[in-house]
Amino acid sequence: MAPPRSRRSPLGRLRGHHIGAYGLLALAALLFLVFSIIVPNTFPTLESISSILANQSIPAVLALGAMIPITTGKFDLSIGYGLGLAHVVVLWLILDDGWPWPLACLVVILGGAVVGALNGVIVEFGQIDSFIATLGTGSVLYAFTGWITGGARVVPGARGLPTAFTDIYDSKFLGLPVPAFYVLGLAVALWLILERLPLGRYLYVIGSNVRAAELVGIPTRKYSVYAFTGAGLVVGFAGVLLAAQQQIGNPSVGMDYLLPAFVGALLGCTAIKPGRANALGTLVAVAVLAIGLAGIGQLGAEFWTTPLFNGGTLLIAVGLAGYSARRQLRAGASATRRTSATTNGDPSENTP
């Protein structure tokens, strides 16, 4: 009889799971500690923390939006273009057409959902790869942005923007910037949807194995469209926040947010629930990026370090996400073999 194969103890597997799930959170804490030691006079202050929370709120919202289609194994590359169009349209409706700002914001957010649904229909019913389809629709959105603005910035006149509108970004609550609470609320809402509701479970099944999802009766196309619609809704909301922050419509600003959003969403696949996109993991990933960028900024790094940091982190994120997914598949296959061995009565497969 073949000698028993050595296996990791349950304690070792548990320790490995905790490292995989919470390693990124530990990295965020470590980065904060390191920068606090290196620049103690500026980094670990309430003013610095408030600045980080405010500056990274829009990338965080966009990363959470990008995460939604990723749960189904799809990507929405139009989110950057959609962000640019949304924030321009909000300002255009308020300044040029004189719309009440709440109505303008509502229309833009719902318009974002319509664009997202259109992306989903093109991908699922047109049977076009999500990379190509959303890149194409993104280019169309960018063309609309240029048409609306004439290629120029949307600048408030002497009357300016309503204070109540700009306060949705500039105000504070409990001493912290209000946008940080938007991010937290959105993350909790997405966590509840994805982890506690049937909709989220369907999206994860589709992302794991489309064929298996179809065999168990899940309408995969419909739920994939739902995922893109959710992403568009979040992008519309991010556009409203960007308009309140910038207070000037810049037709090309949206693309600056595309890479950080995907870095956060993909890096989030390696945390909390390793191997799959999840809201809390994305929140942790955004925290790592925010702390890292703020730290190197306070160290006086050159302007080119930001795209270098984002690009390098994206490569690491994709590699780690792929590794986590493969590890999860191997663990599932191993569990299946052990179950089969137990059923067949082979003791060598169950030796600890």
Image (spheres, grey):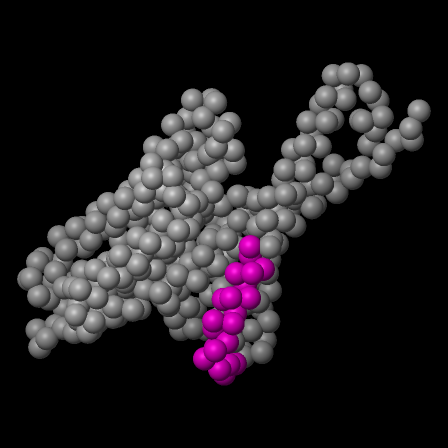
- Tell me where residue 20 appears, x and y as whole percent: 63, 49
Image coordinates for residue 157, horizontal then vertical, percent: 10, 75
Q: Which residues are magenta?
A: 297-318
Q: Does the stretch in magenta take in 88?
A: no
Image quadrant in which you'd find residue 273: top right
Name the residue: 52% across, 72% down.
308
Confirm whether residue 139 shows in the render.
Answer: yes
Q: Residue at x 92, y 31 (%)?
A: 3
Q: Is residue 342 above or below residue 235?
A: above
Q: Position of residue 323 (x, y in %)?
A: 63, 49
**Quadrant location, the C terminus:** top right
Residue situated furthest left in the rendering: 98
- The answer to whether residue 185 is above or below residue 52 is above
In this orientation, does residue 42 appear?
Answer: no
Q: Looking at the image, which is closer to me, 211 or 181? A: 211
* Depth order, front residue of 164/203: 203
Of residues 180 and 341, the one drawn nearer to the viewer in this rendering? 341
Residue 316 on the magenta segment = yes
The mark total stands at 0
Q: Is residue 327 left or right of residue 67?
A: right
Give me the residue at 16% from left, 74% from top: 155
Pick whichever, 214 or 308, lies toward us: 214
* Relative vertical location of residue 293 with respect to residue 197 in this rendering, above or below: below
Displayed quadrant of residue 125: top left
Which of the 4 quarters of the picture holds residue 249? bottom left
Find residue 294 and report its horizontal and vertical position in percent. 47, 72
Q: Main secondary structure of the magenta part?
A: helix
Tell me what residue is drawn at x 52 percent, y 33 percent: 209
Which quadrant holds the N terminus?
A: top right
In the depicted structure, whether residue 243 falls above or below residue 4: below
